[in-house]
């Protein structure tokens, strides 16, 4: 979106206001300076601005989108065919456009220079190689840009000899190449992470800069009349351009998603208390009835026919079977001397004899049909059903960070934030990485989005908190 807006605005400026720029150049310089200063000041208060203003207005200046396209127009003017319609339209205001581009670029230099230069001087060990290289190249670009822009003013250009002026202008080719490298270093990591906007930017800028290089070299050979076969030159140029752009497009193919994942360090441990000599929770009869019986590990039955009538026969078990047979039938047979009670189960029958006092009277003893299952645990009373505020699930929300979106995914289970993941589209993910280490853990510990910001990464911290709260709001039950 920014690419399209910047391109349209930059093209309209010379084609619609070309004559005005030539006639009132100083006025355009002042207006450009006002825009640049205003955007620089507002960049420090981006958190208080609407998202639309941050993404589609302020970013045009703070990210140097318009300035970059103005440099591209100035660059391409030198590669166009002499006498063509475009060169007649652009060449008269080429110097003025370069000065406007320089003034607008200062906003980008100030906004990001204070961040990266401070980090380069005091915390260079924390900078990735790509970021360190980009910062050094940016410093070199500013060094080249200053003399190129200064000698573009008419009053200064008149005081510089044509030979010296041409020598200085040759550094413009290096400046254009550094712009392209700068864009690639910034956009390729995000393009490879699957962001389609940055993938489009890398391919589009590659077409612009690679085509310019080919056209400029082609124009050089044609002007010097060093090429006999023009058709062959055109064919070679087209093939080189196509192969180069395709190579870049292949290189920036998205990689598998890399998502930052933080889980709580202290997980809840559920402990189960069981009574002694029990290996599993007590099963209800209805549950036991569906399972086949198993043999007890050790059991013994003692039979004492000479025992006194007052004593009771005991059956001792050293360990109860894991599962108790469900159907137990009893057969009572009486004799003048003894009463034999036989327990018939699915297992081996166990017989117990008990002597009788009265040998003449048969004894009828009522035996329970089911032997109760020994309880191994105390049943806890059922707790009342809890009323939850949030629906269980995973919810995603986005908030604007320092200069790009921060996307957070929150997982909720029983009103507990159990997991947080996050990605950033900010130009430098270093500050997001700093923020997530502290902010993610605080949110998980406190179970709320309003926590302390990470020192040195305030914008990214606030964006994380805001996105988490938006995700929780979307998870609320209606």
Image (spheres, grey):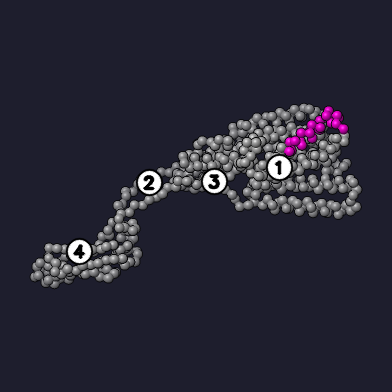
Q: Main secondary structure of the magenta part?
A: helix
How far is disc 1 from disc 4 in space, using C-alphas? Answer: 91 Å
Residue holding disc 3: 421
Residue holding disc 2: 385
Give the mark nearest the N terminus, 4 or 2. Answer: 4
- Mark number displayed over residue 98: none
Give the mark nearest the N terminus, 1 or 4. Answer: 1
What secondary structure is found at the residue carrying circle 1? helix
What secondary structure is found at the residue carrying circle 4? loop
Residue 69: x and y in percent read 74, 39
Residue holding disc 1: 182
Residue 475: x and y in percent read 49, 43
How far is disc 4 from disc 2 in space, using C-alphas? Answer: 46 Å
- Mark 2 burial class by Cα count in 10 Å: few <14, some 14-19, many 20+: few
Q: Identify the image quadrant of residue 461.
A: top right
Task: Tell me the quadrant of the picture where the N terminus can be found.
Answer: top right
Residues 73 and 318: in front is 318
Residue holding disc 4: 314
């Amino acid at each position: 979106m920014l690419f399209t807006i910047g391109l349209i605005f930059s093209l309209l400026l010379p084609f619609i206001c070309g004559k005005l720029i030539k006639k009132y150049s100083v006025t355009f310089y002042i207006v450009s300076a006002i825009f640049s200063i205003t955007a620089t000041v507002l960049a420090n208060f981006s958190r208080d601005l609407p998202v639309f203003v941050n993404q589609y207005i302020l970013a045009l200046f703070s990210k140097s989108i318009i300035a970059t396209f103005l440099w591209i127009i100035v660059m391409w003017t030198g590669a166009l065919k002499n006498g063509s319609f475009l060169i007649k339209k652009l060449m008269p205001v080429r110097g003025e456009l370069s000065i406007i581009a320089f003034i607008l670029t200062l906003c980008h230099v100030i906004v990001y220079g204070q961040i990266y230069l401070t980090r380069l001087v005091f915390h260079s060990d924390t900078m990735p190689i790509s970021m360190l290289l980009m910062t050094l190249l940016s410093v070199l670009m500013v060094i080249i840009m200053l003399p190129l822009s200064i000698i573009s003013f008419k009053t200064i250009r008149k005081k510089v000899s044509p030979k010296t002026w041409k020598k200085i202008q040759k550094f413009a080719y290096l400046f254009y190449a550094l712009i392209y490298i700068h864009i690639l270093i910034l956009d390729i990591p995000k393009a490879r992470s699957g962001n389609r906007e940055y993938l489009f930017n890398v391919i589009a800028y590659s077409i612009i800069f690679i085509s310019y290089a080919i056209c400029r070299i082609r124009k050089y050979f044609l002007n010097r009349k060093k090429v006999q076969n023009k058709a062959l030159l055109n064919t070679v140029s087209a093939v080189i351009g196509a192969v180069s752009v395709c190579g870049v497009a292949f290189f920036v193919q998205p990689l598998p998603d890399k998502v930052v994942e933080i889980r709580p360090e202290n997980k809840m441990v559920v402990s189960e208390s069981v009574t002694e000599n029990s290996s599993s929770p007590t099963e209800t009869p209805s549950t036991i009835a569906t399972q086949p019986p198993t043999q007890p590990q050790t059991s013994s039955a003692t039979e004492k026919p000479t025992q006194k009538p007052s004593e009771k026969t005991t059956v001792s078990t050293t360990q109860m079977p894991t599962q108790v047979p469900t159907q137990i039938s009893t057969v009572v047979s009486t004799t003048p001397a003894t009463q034999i009670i036989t327990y018939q189960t699915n297992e081996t029958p166990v017989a117990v004899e008990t002597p009788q006092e009265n040998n003449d009277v048969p004894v009828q003893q009522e035996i329970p049909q089911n032997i109760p299952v020994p309880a191994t645990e105390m049943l806890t009373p059922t707790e009342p059903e809890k009323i939850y505020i949030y629906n269980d699930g995973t919810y995603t929300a986005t908030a604007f960070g320092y200069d790009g979106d921060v996307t957070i995914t929150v997982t909720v289970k029983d009103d507990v934030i159990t997991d947080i993941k996050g990605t950033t589209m900010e130009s430098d993910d270093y500050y997001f990485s700093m923020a997530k280490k502290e902010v993610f853990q605080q949110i998980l510990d406190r179970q709320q989005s309003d926590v302390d910001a990470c020192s040195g990464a305030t914008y990214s911290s606030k964006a994380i908190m805001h996105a988490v709260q938006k995700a929780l709001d979307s998870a609320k039950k209606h």
